[in-house]
Image (cartoon, helix red, strand yellow):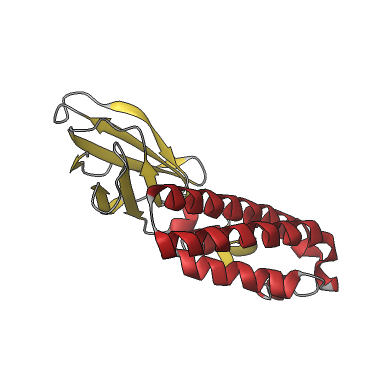
């Protein structure tokens, strides 16, 4: 049995900078002043306000570059994603009362998530697609990571740990709710090992993935 009562938040959260700008513009264009979304007008206006700030910061970062402008752009992006999440919560709260719940969600550009109602199978461990430190990012002690999941919709959180002594001891405390994330405050100048596991629906956990070494800049 499959239930469809959620929006796929990963769909818009994992968009690139320019696609996210276009997506937010579509949400505002179709939702603002639309009587079908009167109950969500405050959230739509919040998306409009944050998208204007994000668009401006993105333009400055792309035109002039620089660490400060990139940091400001990333902050504005996070603020925009946060208000999109609030809009999604408001939409999900009432979609069940609509004649066509799917159309109510999809009209604004959101993608519906098909969630198994009672999934209890084994959760595969994460696959590390990319992990790097430094490169075009001048910040020190930052490690960027992208993981792959067999079924992203069943993943509630990602737990990670680091070893600075080739796996003899491990330090816990790394956590994310997104498959693409960055870890800040990592020890510079260390060839660290990282490994991760998934926390999934119905209180399930995967095994730890094989560790991957990263020279932290």
- Examine the rendered structure and indicate whether residue 60 appears above or below residue 122: below
Q: Is residue 18 left or right of residue 195?
A: right
Q: Is residue 162 left or right of residue 213?
A: right
Residue 131: percent from the left, percent from the top? Answer: 26, 50
Please tell me which residue lies in front, 103 or 122: 103
Viewer can see residue 52: yes
**What residue is at 49 percent from the left and 57 percent from the top?**
153
Residue 54: percent from the left, percent from the top? Answer: 57, 59
Viewer can see residue 109: no
Number of numbered tags placed on the structure image:
0
Residue 110: percent from the left, percent from the top? Answer: 61, 68
Quadrant including the C terminus: top left
Q: Is residue 108 left or right of residue 215?
A: right
**What residue is at 32 percent from the left and 49 percent from the top?**
145
Outermost residue, left direction?
Answer: 166
Please tell me which residue lies in front, 142 or 107: 142
Quadrant including the N terminus: bottom right
**Residue 61 occupies which quadrant of the picture?**
bottom left
**What residue is at 71 percent from the left and 58 percent from the top?**
92
- Examine the rendered structure and indicate whether residue 36 appears above or below residue 136: below
Please tell me which residue lies in front, 95 or 16: 16
**What residue is at 45 percent from the left and 52 percent from the top?**
69
Outermost residue, top direction?
Answer: 169
Please tell me which residue lies in front, 189 or 69: 69
**Residue 35 occupies which quadrant of the picture?**
bottom right
Residue 17: percent from the left, percent from the top? Answer: 47, 64
């Amino acid at each position: 049995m499959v239930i469809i009562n959620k929006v796929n938040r990963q769909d818009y959260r994992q968009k690139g900078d320019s696609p996210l700008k276009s997506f937010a513009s579509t949400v505002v264009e179709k939702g603002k002043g639309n009587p079908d979304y009167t109950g969500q007008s405050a959230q739509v206006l919040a998306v409009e306000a944050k998208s204007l700030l994000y668009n401006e910061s993105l333009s400055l970062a792309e035109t002039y570059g620089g660490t400060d402008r990139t940091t400001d752009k990333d902050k504005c992006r996070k603020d925009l994603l946060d208000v999109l999440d609030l809009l999604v919560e408001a939409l999900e709260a009432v979609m069940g009362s609509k004649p066509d719940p799917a159309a109510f969600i999809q009209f604004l550009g959101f993608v519906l998530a098909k969630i198994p109602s009672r999934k209890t199978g084994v959760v595969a461990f994460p696959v590390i697609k990319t992990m790097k430190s430094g490169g075009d990012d001048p910040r020190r002690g930052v490690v960027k990571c992208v993981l792959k999941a067999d079924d992203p919709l069943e993943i509630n959180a990602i737990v990670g740990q680091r070893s600075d002594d080739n796996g003899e001891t491990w330090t816990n405390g790394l956590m994310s709710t997104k498959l693409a994330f960055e870890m800040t405050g990592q020890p510079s100048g260390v060839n660290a090992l990282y490994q991760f596991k998934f926390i999934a629906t119905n209180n399930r956990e995967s095994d730890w993935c094989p560790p991957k070494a990263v020279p932290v800049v």
